[in-house]
Amino acid sequence: MALKSNFAFFLERWTVLANLGETAERNVHIDPHTTLMKLRLFAETMTKYILASENIREAYGTTQVDRINTLRREGILEPELIEMFETLRRKGNQAVHEADYGKIEEAKAMLHIAFRMSVWFMEVYGDWSFQAPEYVEYSEQLETDKIDLLQQEYDNKVKKLEEELEAIRQKAELEQPNAKVERKQISKKFVRRQQLTEAETRTIIDEKLRLSGWEVDTNGLNHYTKGTLPQKNRNMAIAEWKAGSGRVDYALFIGLQLVGLIEAKAKHKNVPSVLESQTKTYAKNIASIENEQLTPTKGDYKVPFLYATNGRPFLRQLQEESGIWFWDSRKLTEHARPLEGWHSPEDLQLLLSQDDEAANEQLQEEDITKFGLRPYQQNAVLAAEKALQEGQRKMLMAMATGTGKTRTAIALMYRLIKAKKSRRILFLVDRKALGRQTENALKDTEIEGLPFSSIYDVKSLEDMSPEVMTRVHIATVQGMVHRLFYSEDKRMPSVGQYDFIIVDEAHRGYTSDREMSEDELIFEDQNDYISQYRRVIDYFDAACLGLTATPA
C-alpha cells in the first residue's frame, strides 16, 4: 500500500503545492535531481502565495531572490525561514544547471525542510490551529505513469495560479490590520520550537561551505565512512575526521595542509560552549596521519582556525545561540567571535599570512612624520592603530569638515597595509561622487615619492570584486548590498574578503543619488537604508572605522 504524501494537507486549498510536494517526494529514490528541481518550484510557489496573502504585488520579472528579500525586508520571514527558502533555491538552481546534480540523502533532507516550511505556511496562512501530522520519510517508488499524471495535473493547475493569487490579494485588501501582527507572532513561535535534524543541519552547512569555495559532501567526502583524504590543489572540507578518540564534524584542508576544524551541533543552544568544550579539545588531540600537514599555531593547539555552529543563521539578539563562532588559536588572548558566514580558502590563506606581533612592531617603528600630516591627523592615525592593536573591532574618527579626513585615512591605510596589519581594505561610501573623490585622492596623494595607487592595487567603483593583489576596494553601499543580498550569483563575497572597513561620512542619512543606476537605488526609506548599511558592515569579518564630522 502506498504511503500518504506528507504534503497531502495542502490538497483542499493549495493543490499546486500538494502536487509539487508529492512529485518531489515520490522521485526522491529514483531521481533525486528531479526532487530538487520540484522543491525549487515548490518554494517559489509558496513565496508567491505569501506575497499575495500580504497584499504585496509582484512586478514583472520578479525573481525568487527578489521575493525572499521583500519578505525579509517586510519582516514576514524569520532568519531561519529565509535560510530554508534560500537553500531550496540554490540547490534547485544547481539541479537545473547540472544534469547529474542531486543525491538521495541530500534530497531527503531537503524534503524534510520543505515539510517544515509547509507546516509553518499552514499555521500562519491556513489555519492558526493547524496540527501538523508526523513527518514520515518516503521510501516507496512511484510508477512512471503516476509521475506523468502528477506532472500533467500540476501543469493544469499552474495555468490557474495567477487567478488564484489575484483572489488571495483581493481578500488580503479587506483583512484587519492586526492580522499581520498575529501572523508574525505565530511565525516567531513556530521558529522557536523548531529543531532541525542532524541531516538537515549538515545539508545546510554543506551548501554554505560550498558557496564559500570548499569542496564538501558530508556523505561523499567523509574520512570515517569513505576513507577520504586531502589532496594537492584541492580545498576540501572532509567530514568526520579523526581527532584523538573522537571525530570532528569537518576538517578544512587547503591542499594537504589542515587549517581548520568545524564542530556542528544541531541541537545545541549555546554555540560558544561547543567551541570551548569540543572544537578546542579536538584541536589539541588531533594527530598528523598519512599526507596531512599540521599548521603551526600557539599553545597546545595544532590547528589554527576553529569553528562551532548549530546551523542557525546569525541573530544579534541571540548571538550565543546562533551563527558561526570562530576563534584563531594563534591569538590566545583574543575572544571567539560570531560570523554570518564561512571563511573561504582564500580568506584563511590571507589570515595565515598575517603575523600580528610583527605587524604591531613594524607600525611602532614606521616613521609617521614622512606623510606630512598635521599633529592632530597624526594623533588620529596612531589612535586608530592603537585601538586595532588592542583588539577593538568598531571605531569612530571624528574630524571637522575641511580638516583632511581623506588624507588621514589614506595615511592610515598605507601604514596598515605596509605593516601587513591589514591585507585588504573596503572603503565604503554612500554616493558615487564620494567614491570618485577618494579614487582621485589615492591617485594624487604621493607617499615616499609615488602615488598611493601606484604602490598598491586599488579597485574602483566600476570593479565588482577585488583581485588577489587588491589592497583597497572602493564601493558604494548600494552596490555592495546588491552583490551580497540581491544577486543570483552562485559565489557571493566571502565574510573574510576584507579585514578592515572604512566608512566615509558615517553620519550620513539616506541619500538618493541621481547618478546611481536603477540597481543601486534599492532602498525604500531611511530605516531601510540604515538597516541595509548595517547588514553590509556586520556581514564581513572585519574591523570597522567610521569617519565623520558630526559624531552626535
Image: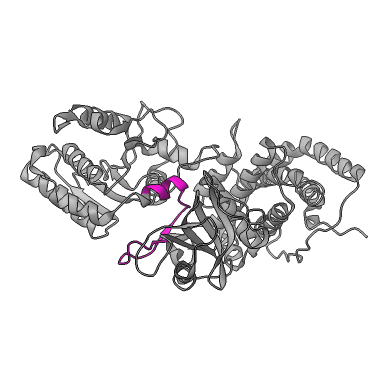
Near-viewer residue (171 or 27): 27
Residue sitting at x 14%, y 33%: 448
Asked if the stretch drawn in magenta spans residue 349, the answer is: yes
- Residue 280 figure quarter: bottom left
Q: Quadrant of the N terminus?
A: bottom right
Q: What's drawn in magenta, residue-wise?
A: 326-350
Q: Which of the 4 quarters of the picture holds residue 98?
A: top right
Left or right? Give the position of 24 relative to 420: right
Q: Is residue 249 visible?
A: yes
Residue depicted at 21% across the width and 40% down the height: 414
**Depth check, front residue: 417 or 301:** 301
Quadrant in the picture for residue 299: bottom left
Q: State whether residue 536 is above or below residue 469.
A: below
**Residue 225, position as x, y percentages in the image:** 67, 61
Observer able to see residue 430: no
Q: Is residue 315 magenta?
A: no
Q: Nearer the viewer, residue 481 or 453?
A: 453
**507 in relation to 452, above or below:** below
| Residue 20, image x, y percentages | 77, 46
